[in-house]
Amino acid sequence: MKSDQPTITPVELLISVVLPAFNAEKYIAEAVRSILDQTLTNFELIVINDGSTDNTLAILEELRDKDARVIVISRENRGLVESLNEGIDLARGKWIARMDADDIALPHRFERQLEWLERTGADISGSWVQRFGSSDKRVVRLPQTDDAIKMAMLFCSPFAHPAVIMRTSLVKRLGYDKRWEKAEDYDLWERAAEAGWKMANVPEVLLSYRVHAEQISTLTANRQQQLTQGIRRRYGAFVSHSMRLNQSWIDEVLKISESSLSELDMDAVDAAFTGLLQQSHGEARDVVFDHATRLYFRAAANCPNIVSRWSKLNREFGKGFKVATKLQLWLFRLLQVRADGALFKQLKRIYIWRASR
């Protein structure tokens, strides 16, 4: 007998939030509540308790008992990458959102990111983030458009990892690679770029990023830097091929990020940046020129004519006369401010790194 009851189609789950946690009792409740308080409510929150030995699990179980959207998976410690991939495997939503156990999502984060994904047609969207928890309270302004993000990726990671939302069907195919743990996010973005994902960042702060001494990035900076340089070189080969540039030119550019600059070929560096800038437009060109300026500062102590080289690039692709930048480059050269020295680290905060990485 045919039923008179209407057929109810279940609402599609929009977002699966993946949040790994290890010994996070100080901050986990605040992080989880910032997700549960989102203006968009159609999500599940998958928390992977990665073998915590503190009170993390008890806090999570209490939060789960109060909100059915919280799913807690608890087991022995396996590391961040395995936790991320486990959460991805369990995800049922159309989109996967990342979140860290020590950060705070603004209440409208998901709502704004889904609007942005729909507007841009992107497969992944991050956002700007606001640092807190230390004297460093900068707003990290990340590139907005697909072209600009993919140019920025040649120099650094173009997303704040805990602020991204990714298309589930795509990230399930790629996943995180344990071989690149400590730089697993940058590795994923690089492979996603080569796979053709369309990328975007919402140009507003949607996440508060906590800075503290226990962070993985602080404790493992040297290993992270080695992995990051490997990813840059891998992506440099891809960019060289796709833009039909001499790969040795790009290799010279990437050498500037390393500690030794004694055998740097600045003619090749100039040629690389000229080629990149000629094929870039709008925000993408601004990103390349900004990174070129930063790297010329790093090379200043080893290059007698650094000011004239930068000035030529600025005449062709820059905006304005930039007299202050010329003076600063001249001072870096005159004072022999080396990229691996303490003085460089102090001065770059004033002169170079005003736009956040």
Image (cartoon, rainbow, N blue to C red):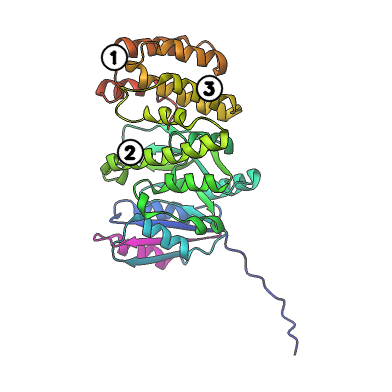
Question: Nearer the viewer's eye, disc 1 or disc 3?
Answer: 3
The residue that disc 1 covers is 336
- In the rendered structure, the answer to whether residue 43 lies left or right of residue 12 reads left
Q: Is residue 133 above or below residue 343?
A: below
Going by the numbered disc 2, the residue's amino acid type is Gln
Question: Nearer the viewer's eye, disc 2 or disc 3?
Answer: 3
Q: Quadrant of the N terminus?
A: bottom right
Q: Position of residue 5 (x, y in %)?
A: 72, 80
Total count of labels: 3
Question: Is residue 253 on the magenta stretch?
Answer: no
**Residue 168, quarter of the rendered image:** bottom right
Question: Mark number for residue 274?
Answer: 3
Going by the numbered disc 1, the residue's amino acid type is Gln
Q: Give the residue at the far bottom of this rendering.
A: 1
The residue that disc 2 covers is 225
Q: Disc 2 vs disc 1: Cβ atoms closer than 8 Å?
A: no
**Residue 305, quarter of the rendered image:** top left
Q: Disc 1 vs disc 3: Cβ atoms closer than 8 Å?
A: no
- In the rendered structure, the answer to whether residue 106 lies left or right of residue 223 reads right
Q: Disc 2 vs disc 3: Cβ atoms closer than 8 Å?
A: no
Q: Residue at x 49, y 34 (%)?
A: 152
Q: Residue at x 63, y 43 (%)?
A: 120
Question: Dot 1: few (<14), some (14–19), or many (≥20) neighbours within 10 Å?
Answer: some
Q: Is residue 40 above or below residue 152?
A: below
Given residues 152 and 215, the one toward you in this image is 152
